[in-house]
Image: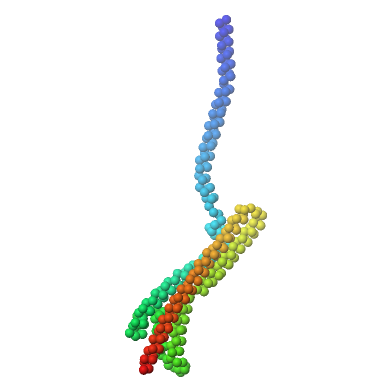
Amino acid sequence: MFSRLSGLIAAIAIAATLGFSPAQAQEQKAAEAASAVAEVAAPAAVEAAPSAPTGKAAMDNPYGLQAMLAHGDMVSKGVLALLLIMSMGSWYILITKLWDTQKLGKEAKEVRATFFKKSSLAEGVKGLSEGSAFRYIAASAIEASEHHEGALTENIDHSTWVTMNIERSVSEVQSRVQTGLGFLATVGSTSPFIGLFGTVWGILQALTAIGVAGQASIDKVAGPVGEALIMTAIGLAVAVPAVLGYNWLVNRNKSVVGQVRAFAADLHGVLMGNRQVAKR
């Protein structure tokens, strides 16, 4: 009986061992599979980490000015270069003419305060700086007053002769002051149309490329059209300062030239007064 009981216990132990062995094998296989997945996932995560800057670069605007310079043809680049030259020229004229009118206005105040207080016109001319518009007018008027001879000019009275020379000098000064205003007017009136031409040309090239490709998706249309519209914006950016600067300089020139004409009128009166005194 004891031997039967021992055999029964041994049989139960063998059956339990055989029952638990498949479960342990499955758990071991599951652990191995999990470790394999972790090993594969780790390099993938390492490779995915450097891709963040690429995504950031993709967020940059691919339809801006840089893209237009990179992909534009010779016509687009030529239009852009022309607008750049026009802008540089207009800003140069604005700055130089502002300096000239400011200098001329300052000289006008100094001349009005000191010139006619000198003991003679010769002393007044010497007190004016070299290259000054007022010195040029004064010297021309004095020369015309002192040299009124010749068979061709003897029929012109002295006052008219001096007036003609003074007006000629003032006109030359006014012409120098207004130099460059024509360029500003040209830039202000033509640069929007030049920019519009660049836009039309860019859209035409974009539509041609879309027709050849046979695809009209938004990413195929937005880029070329956006690059073309930049030309219109650049044209307006060139035109607006030119127009505003032209109007501003015209008003400043009127004020400065008015002061020059006032000096010329006073100088003419002084010369005619000296003439009358000399006759007496």
Foreground pick, 58 / 35: 58
Residue 193 lies in quadrant: bottom right
Name which residue lies at 37% across and 77% down. Answer: 110
Query: Residue 80 or 135: which is nearer the viewer?
Result: 135
Query: In this picture, is 28 found above or below 216?
Result: above
Colour approach in the figure = rainbow
In the rendered view, does 157 fall on the left or right side of 228? left
Please provide percent x and percent y for residue 91.
48, 68
Instruction: Residue at 56%, 11% (x, y): give it.
Output: 9
Point out residue 261 in the picture as x, y percentages from the top left corner.
44, 81
Q: How many numbered discs?
A: 0
Q: Position of residue 81 (x, y in %)?
A: 53, 65
Looking at the image, the residue that sits furthest to the top is 1
Quadrant that contains the N terminus:
top right
Residue 63, image quadrant: bottom right
Q: Residue at x 49, y 74 (%)?
A: 250
Quadrant in the rendering for residue 25: top right
Left/right of residue 204 with respect to residue 64 in the rendered view: right
Is residue 153 in view? no
Instruction: Provide residue 31's location: percent of width, then percent of height.
Output: 54, 29
51 to 170, vertically: above or below: above
- Residue 266 is at least partly visible in this image: yes
Name the residue located 56 percent from the left edge and 66 percent from the top edge. Answer: 192
Q: Nearer the viewer, residue 264 or 242?
A: 264
Quarter of the figure with the C terminus: bottom left
